[in-house]
Image (spheres, grey):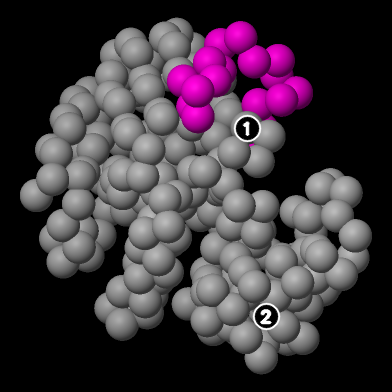
Amino acid sequence: MIEFKHVFKSYGQSANILADINFNISRGEFVFVSGPSGAGKSTLLKLIGGLEPPTRGSIMVNGQSLDSMPARERPYLRRAVGIILQDTHLLYDRNAFENVMLPLAVMNLDYKKAASRARAAIAKVGLSGKEKLNPIALSGGEQQRLAIARAIVNRPAILIADEPTANLDQDNASRILEVFRDFNRVGVTTLIASHDMPLLQRHANRTLLLEPGRFKDLGKH
Ligand SMILES: Nc1ncnc2c1ncn2[C@@H]1O[C@H](COP(=O)(O)OP(=O)(O)OP(=O)(O)O)[C@@H](O)[C@H]1O
């Protein structure tokens, strides 16, 4: 489903952020990417989402090789991948419902169908009834859930999230993880970057550990 073969990544003239990374993630897996700040977790997720090209090596996502994919098709891999970045990029000049509708605008669905999909996505993350609120009026955890709804409204096969529980208390962090688990249970391959070790330990899963100059697949623990 996601395969890295001898992947290297540097920015401009910088030293390698990622060096000779190799791993395979199967369809339906739930995987954490962990490691200290600056180790390259966000970079790894951006490579998977096609938001950054590798400097060297080959990457396969959802049966497609990114090497041969034209640059214009790479971002978000034509909707195969739902991405939640560290900054949720919610738009504060429209309400929660309209934020979730945005990715559907390019889908050529009629309004009724799009609206019912958006409402279903909002319901799945537990925000029914808050559709008309501006995201600014939502709590941190609710904003994160809204960003998840927006990422899954196009029904991606893969969901990746960068530090989705940062700045949340333990209860809210667990709630967010449960939302990801719900999508994972219905077959969505899920990757979550986090440096919150206690959180990762509470939710034992396969973990890819990135440390400066070192990469380790810790497997399930
Ligand atoms: N667009 C960019 N241009 C230049 N350098 C970058 C760029 N993006 C990231 N970097 C550098 O790459 C390194 C890894 O960054 P990255 O954001 O991938 O790490 P991270 O493990 O996700 O860190 P954090 O947990 O703090 O988000 C950092 O030294 C960062 O400054």
- Cα gap from disc 1 to disc 2, whole angstroms: 29 Å
Compare residues 182 and 172 and report the one nearer the observer: 182
Residue drawn where x is 19% and y is 25% of the image: 214
User: Pointer 1: residues within 10 angstroms few (<14), some, or many (20+)?
Assistant: many
The kind of secondary structure element at disc 2 is helix
Q: Label 2 belongs to which residue?
A: 136
Compare residues 61 and 74 and report the one nearer the observer: 61
Q: Quadrant of residue 79?
A: top right
Q: Confirm whether the magenta stretch covers residue 41.
A: no
Residue drawn where x is 78% and y is 55% of the image: 104
**In this rendering, does residue 52 appear at all?**
yes
Q: Label 1 belongs to which residue?
A: 77
Give the mark nearer the N terminus: 1 vs 2: 1
Compare residues 169 and 27 and report the one nearer the observer: 27
Give the residue type at disc 2. Answer: Ile
Residue 32: assigned label: none
Which quarter of the figure is the N terminus placed in? top left
Over which residues does the magenta segment extend?
60-76
Compared to residue 183, the image places residue 219 above or below, namely above
Tell me where residue 188 appears, x and y as whole percent: 44, 50
